[in-house]
Structures are given as C-alpha cells and as structure tokens.
Image (cartoon, helix red, strand yellow):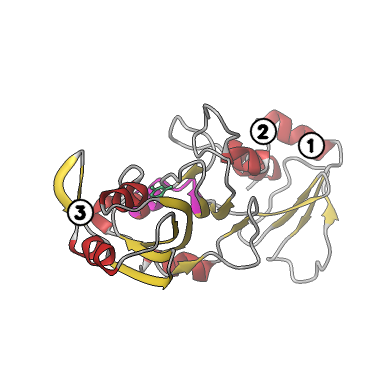
C-alpha cells in the first residue's frame, strides 16, 4: 500500500494533504516486516510501497501505530457530552486526536463513534470504534453485554431497594420491568449495579423508581473489560487484541 494511502486511511487528511506531509519530510516509518530496521526512517516518497500491518508511523513527531480499524477506550470525564454536536458541555470527541475524528469510512459518518452514551455528569469507560459490525455487536440490545456502574446514592441504601432493583422496576416509557443483573452494596451510599440493557438514564431512573437518587455515577466495566486504573479522566488508549477478544467473547 502506498504511504500516502496509508496516511489517508489513518485520518491524516485528503490524499493530497497526506502526500504533502510526506514530501515535506513530516513522516517517518518503522516497518514490522523489515527486521533490519530498528528506528524510524524518514520517508519522503509519498508513493513508497509499505506493508501496513505492524507499521509504525511518526507524523510530525507523533507516534502513530497503523490500525486497519480503530478500537479504543476513553475514560470519560464529568462535564462532557457524548454527542458530536453537544448542547451545553464540550464533546468527548474533542479529547481525541484529529486523525481519529477524521478517519475515512464507507458510511457517511467520519471517524470513530462512541458505542452508546453516558450522561454529561457520568464518568468512566466508553468504547469508540469505526468498525460498524463491532459497534453493532457491542450496542445491540439483543446481545445483553453487561455493564457495571458504580453508583453513589443520596440516601442510605435500604435492603428493600436492592431487592426491588434485582426483581425489576417499571420505568415510565415501558411497561416491562427492567432489572439489574447484579447489585452489590459496598457501603451505606454505594452500589455496584450490573445492567444488560441500555435505556436512557437507566441507572438514575431505576434508583428514582425505588425511592433513592443518584449523586454520582461511574461506569467501571463493559463485558469482561475493566477500566484500567492508570487511564485517568480524559485519557484514551487503543484496545489491545486481548482486550478486543475479551469484549467480543463477553
Ligand atoms: N444510566 C444513567 O442514568 N446514566 C448514564 O450515563 C448511564 C447509565
């Protein structure tokens, strides 16, 4: 694959912009397929043929490992919206580097997309991808991917509230009760709630339905994938192949 096409696939701009980046000496490469190469080599030929798998790019001094498809996790901070066009708070997409927001795709939408949404005041694990099948797999209500929320409540949690959350509560827009798959209390005002559905404001509405109120909400896990402790609010990282396997087999 030509270097300019590789850059284009990664979201570095139009093919013309990508060719310009290379010709102006802004791109260095480190190919996995050439064992002799141990450090980045400047490449000024936009049409140079390279093997993309395992390729490491350095674009304007920033390391960029080639990814045919993008799969990432973000530690969503409070005070951000998951929408591309936020109404009141900054969008989570502003936390990502421009190439991730510009990656070309076959659909009309450019770049990676958040898989599901968290409220502006909710923190924690959010997945993003540009792989339509993966997005569908992870967000389809039929797949029942479990998500764990750490809930801080306004009022002390009563054992009857836990029983109700597990038995099921009726929310105003649906006569079918929604239930927590698991509910563990860690102290008087804290619960870990596992849900396998993703209704609008679900945790807040479930807690309200049992007579309590959410004061703080943090998503700590999706399927078998835990938010790593080192990933601070606002930070993102690529998913490893092992993490991707964990999610797909969840
Ligand atoms: N449930 C909520 O109420 N809010 C979220 O952000 C996620 C789940």
Q: Which residues are magenta?
A: 126-137
Tell me the quadrant of the picture where the C terminus can be found. Answer: bottom left
Q: Secondary structure at mark 3?
A: strand
- Write down the residue under mark 1: 21
Q: Which residue lies at the image location 55% right of the left edge and 52% below the top edge?
A: 68
- Write down the residue under mark 3: 169
Q: Can residue 236 be seen at all in this image of the molecule?
A: yes
Tell me where residue 200 appears, x and y as whole percent: 33, 42
Measure the C-alpha gap from mark 2 to mark 3: 49 Å
Tell me where residue 249 appears, x and y as whole percent: 36, 69
Q: Quadrant of residue 65?
A: bottom right
- Write down the residue under mark 2: 13
Given contact means CB atoms under 8 Å apart, are the residues at marks 2 and 1 in contact?
yes
* Relative side of 60 to 209, left or right: right
Q: Which residue lies at the image location 82% right of the left edge and 59% below the top edge?
A: 40
Q: Is mark 2 within 8 Å of ligand 1?
A: no
Q: Which is more N-terminal, label 1 or label 2? A: 2
Q: Nearer the viewer, residue 171 or 144?
A: 171
Label 3 crowd bin: few (<14), some (14–19), many (20+), radius 10 Å: many
Of tags 2 and 3, the one toward the viewer is: 3
Q: Which residue lies at the image location 43% right of the left edge and 44% below the top edge?
A: 117
Is residue 165 one of those drawn in magenta? no
Q: Nearer the viewer, residue 234 or 5?
A: 234
Is residue 133 one of those drawn in magenta? yes
Q: Which mark is residue 177?
A: none
């Amino acid at each position: 694959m030509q270097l300019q096409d590789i850059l284009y696939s990664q979201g570095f701009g139009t093919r013309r912009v990508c060719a310009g980046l290379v010709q102006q000496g802004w791109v260095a490469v480190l190919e996995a397929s050439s064992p002799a190469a141990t450090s980045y080599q400047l490449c000024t030929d936009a049409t140079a043929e390279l093997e993309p798998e395992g390729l490491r790019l350095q674009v304007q001094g920033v390391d960029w490992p080639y990814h045919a498809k993008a799969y990432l996790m973000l530690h969503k901070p409070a005070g951000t919206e998951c929408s591309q066009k936020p109404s009141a708070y900054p969008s989570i997409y502003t936390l990502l580097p421009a190439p991730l927001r510009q990656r070309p795709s076959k659909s009309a939408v450019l770049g990676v997309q958040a898989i599901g949404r968290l409220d502006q005041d909710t923190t924690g694990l959010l997945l993003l991808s540009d792989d339509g099948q993966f997005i569908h797999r992870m967000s389809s209500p039929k797949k029942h991917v479990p998500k764990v929320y750490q809930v801080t409540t306004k009022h002390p949690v009563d054992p009857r509230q836990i029983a109700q959350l597990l038995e099921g509560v009726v929310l105003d827009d649906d006569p079918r009760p929604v239930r927590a798959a698991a509910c563990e209390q860690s102290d008087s005002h804290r619960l870990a709630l596992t849900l396998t559905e993703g209704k609008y404001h679900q945790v807040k509405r479930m807690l309200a339905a049992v007579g309590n109120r959410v004061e703080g909400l943090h998503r700590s896990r999706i399927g078998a994938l835990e938010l790593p402790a080192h990933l601070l609010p606002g930070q993102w990282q690529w998913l490893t192949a092992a993490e991707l396997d964990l999610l797909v087999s969840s």
